[in-house]
Amino acid sequence: MGGLPNLVVLNLNHNQIQRLPAEIRSLSKLQHLSVLDNKLEEVPVELCHLIKLSEINLTSNKLSRLPQELYHCKELTKLYVARNKLINLPEGIRALEKLQVLDVAGNKLSMFPVEFHLLPLKELYFEGNRFVPCEPMPSVQDVQVLTLKELVARFVLKEDRSRSSLVHRMLPYYPCLTTLLANGGCCALCLGPFLTTWLECVHFVSLKKDMKMRNSVTIPVRALICSYKCFNTDGHSYYASGISSNLPDKRDREREG
């Protein structure tokens, strides 16, 4: 592939391809890639270095995941990954600010990633998945006790938001700490920062009302909430997904005690 630096379109449809070589990153001018109807089980992270890609077609393969680094493909307008084995979409997909067409039909998705509804999509195909039904049951949980590491991390992350704070000015001198804090998140309710302790929730988004699409269907979108204290407040439309959470429940704490 190193001898094709000017290649713009690559069509590998209807073969028996099981993997794409890492050398694919040398196709720096590639704009359209189609590997439809093959036997791909994974997408090499090197593909995400092709920042001029505007269309990717990976329909009808055996993919169980997409690389998180997909967000590097800022020019991507069309992504086809129908009829695979995807359990979730990478959180970084939110950064694809030019994405207009997304086809994830026929996978094993339970919900869409955080802030998915902020994408500028014009077409979304998602039938044949295992989405969380729009019949959630609200529940109230006991307030959890956060670890000292989590408490300190939240304080530092909050202080880092202010450019005038001492913490913000000193962090560049501690690269290991900066790397650790880069994995933090933001609460969907209070907008406060957190590091590793969060509650996975779901809220339901109307394609027509919230995403300005013609389809009036409601889809489940993943959301992270920083604590049960936030989750227990009234007036929000977030529900515990029951899929996973970094927060221990009451029974776990009793067993640990």
Image (cartoon, rainbow, N blue to C red):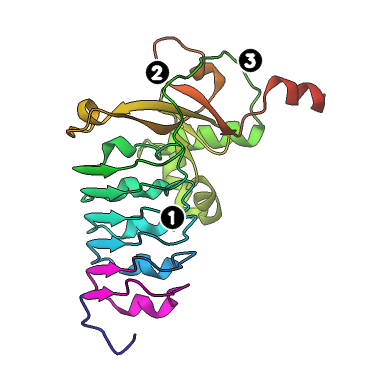
Left or right: residue 5 versus residue 129 is: left
Q: Earlier in the sequence, mark 3 or mark 2?
A: 3
Magenta span: 9-35
Mark nearest the camera among 2 and 1 is: 1
Q: CA distance from mark 2 to mark 1?
A: 31 Å
* Crowd band around label 1 with a 10 angstrom C-alpha radius: few (<14), some (14–19), many (20+): many
Q: Which residue is mark 3?
A: 142
Please tell me which of labels 1 and 3 falls first in the chain. Answer: 1
Label 3 and label 2: CA atoms lie apart by 19 Å
Q: Secondary structure at mark 3?
A: loop
Residue 21 is covered by the magenta coloring? yes
Quick one: SS at disc 1? loop
User: Which mark's residue is nearer the viewer, 3 or 2?
Assistant: 2
- Residue 236 in percent (x, y) is at 40, 15
Nearer-the-camera pick, 252 or 19: 19
Give the foreground label among 1 and 3. 1
Give the label on residue 84, or none.
1
Amino acid type at mark 2 = Ser
